[in-house]
Amino acid sequence: MSLINQNLFLKELKRNRKNLVIWTSIVVAFTVLVLSVFPFMAEMGKDMTMLIDNMPVELQKAMGMTSQTWSNILGFYSTYFGIYIVVLVSIYAASTATTIISKEEKEGTSEFLFTKPISRRTIFWSKMLALLVLTLSIYLVQTISAVIGVYLFKEGHVDWEHLFFMQLNGFFLVTFFTAISLFISMFMQVKTNFMGMVVGLTFGSYILNAVAKSTEATKFLGYFSPFHYIEFDVLSAEYQFYGWAALSFTIVVIVLLFSSLIKLKTKNLAG
Amino acid sequence: MQVISTKDLTKFYGDQVGVKNLNLSVNEGEIFGFVGPNGAGKSTAIRTFLGLLKPTSGSASIFGKDIIKNGPTIRQQIGYLPSEVFYYPEMNSREMLEYHLRFYPEGNHHNINELADFFELNLDKSIADLSFGNKKKCAIIQCFLHKPKLLILDEPTSGLDPLMQNRFFEFLQEQNNKGATVFMSSHILSEIQRMCDRAAVIKNGEIIAVETINELLSKQLKKVTLIFKEAPTDVQTPDSFLNKNLHHQKMTFEFKGQLHELLSWLNNQPIQDITIEEPDLESIFMNYYQR
């Protein structure tokens, strides 16, 4: 028996395309909006630097800002990247993950799908492949819009490699949030509205890391947030791809996926 | 050959019984009825056959293959009609049926348009706009479309008007004549009486009888009504006459036993008229459940 059923895979893409277009439009619009503001901010450069210098150090750390942040387009973009782009894309991908299987049960169509001549394993991986394609689509389009935005609104030198690393690093956070949300949804009642859980999880993780960064006393909290392991401080000269973190996240994602599959395989489908 | 066979198949929901120690065998080419009131375990058994539910213990095989190990292979040859139909609301019937068909290996399938004409279904109407009965028609077409060897029907006629029910049973009979085995659950006994060769009666998750429809009917009490020429004062009857009731010239009783016993007794009675009624499944059914 094959791992992927093409019929189901295509159906999932078709079923989710409307949502994909809406979310992609929001994320792209946001990216372009943020980047288009940069020239005005840079103009006020000195004032902004002063403003940031006057901010409490804790707040600066929490927001990932230094006095240079707003004089460089990448620095400027990076302060929005974590909280808005990664969190927004994660909310999209994770909420799709929570419904991609549970929706069949919630709406009673599981009786149609699960009585077809395909195994639950095939159903699971076909849906996961569709989820991956949807997530890659929104993320890739967002990345392209960021590159175009940076190119259009940049002033002075841009370290393209750092932008690329940041976008790549962000994707591993997105996949982590997606996998953990899927996993949690497998153990919850199908009638649950998962959106609250997804927003709480992604946004909460970001806030937790921000709090952890602000003072020494709260530093330990950071270990509980995935944002702690992948940073977006693109202005640092050694900014790089977090290979080890990416590998660890990938392993966690694989474990979460297989655990979800085992749960699905043993589940009784309610009528 | 046995198409469905179960061995002590048991399904519990927590500590609630779904089905218990189910032992069934359905032969190739027969139309097998599964009779019982709501909540008796009919759908639980069916959903277990289809792999939607995992059995708590026991086993079942379809076409000689284990339902758990070979689920996908078995389901290639099954047409399933659920009692309640849930479809993707964003599709129309044609898209739904085409989507369904693409899950099966290519082959000699029924034609969607022909079946839609036969069952009078508008294929281009969105699922969301279909009435309960029309959704059911779409499900019926879906169930037959890939020409399965085994049809599993759960309350097949609920939601259909009598005309459509008739058409459905005609079509079902035709498929059966061509070799399809049918397993149908119902609480409408006239359907079972009309269609089935054999039936199992299920009560509280356990099978209490598996018999041919003729046996089911013959084993039961016959209702006898006599009209005497003159109103007798007292009538002596054998012990096998039950629930005797004498009123003027008319006497009614229920009879279960050898027919010649009844006939020889009748021979000596001054009777003017007699009616012997066959029990219908309805009363047999009530009989089973009141025991």
Image (tube, grey):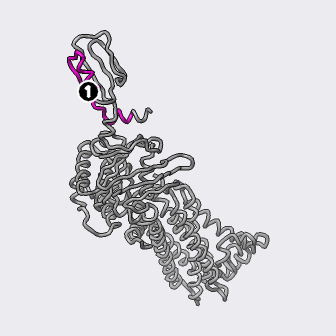
The count of marks equals 1
| Dot 1 alpha-carbon crowd within 10 angstroms: few under 14, some 14 to 19, many 20 or more | some
Residue shown at 38% from the left, 63% from the top = B74
Q: Nearer the viewer, residue A207 or A197?
A: A197
- Tell me residue A220's x, y (percent): 75, 71
Answer yes or no: is residue B35 visible: yes
Residue under label 1, please give it.
B276
Residue B212 to residue A135: above or below: above
Q: Nearer the viewer, residue B225 or B178?
A: B225
Quarter residue B67 falls in: bottom left
Residue A84 to residue B177: above or below: below
Does residue A1 appear left or right of residue A27 in this picture? Answer: left
Quarter residue B215 falls in: top left
Q: Quadrant of the N terminus of chain A?
A: bottom left
Q: What residue type is labelled 1?
A: Ile
Disc 1: which chain? B
Q: Which stretch is magenta?
A: B259-286
Residue shown at 43% from the left, 32% from the top = B290
- Tell me residue B281's x, y (percent): 33, 36
Does residue A182 appear left or right of residue B44 in this picture? Answer: right
Residue found farthest to the bottom: A157
Does residue B210 appear left or right of residue B261 in this picture? Answer: right
Q: Nearer the viewer, residue B135 or A33?
A: B135
In what element is the residue under mark 1? strand
Answer yes or no: is residue A18 visible: no
- Tell me residue B14's x, y (percent): 56, 49
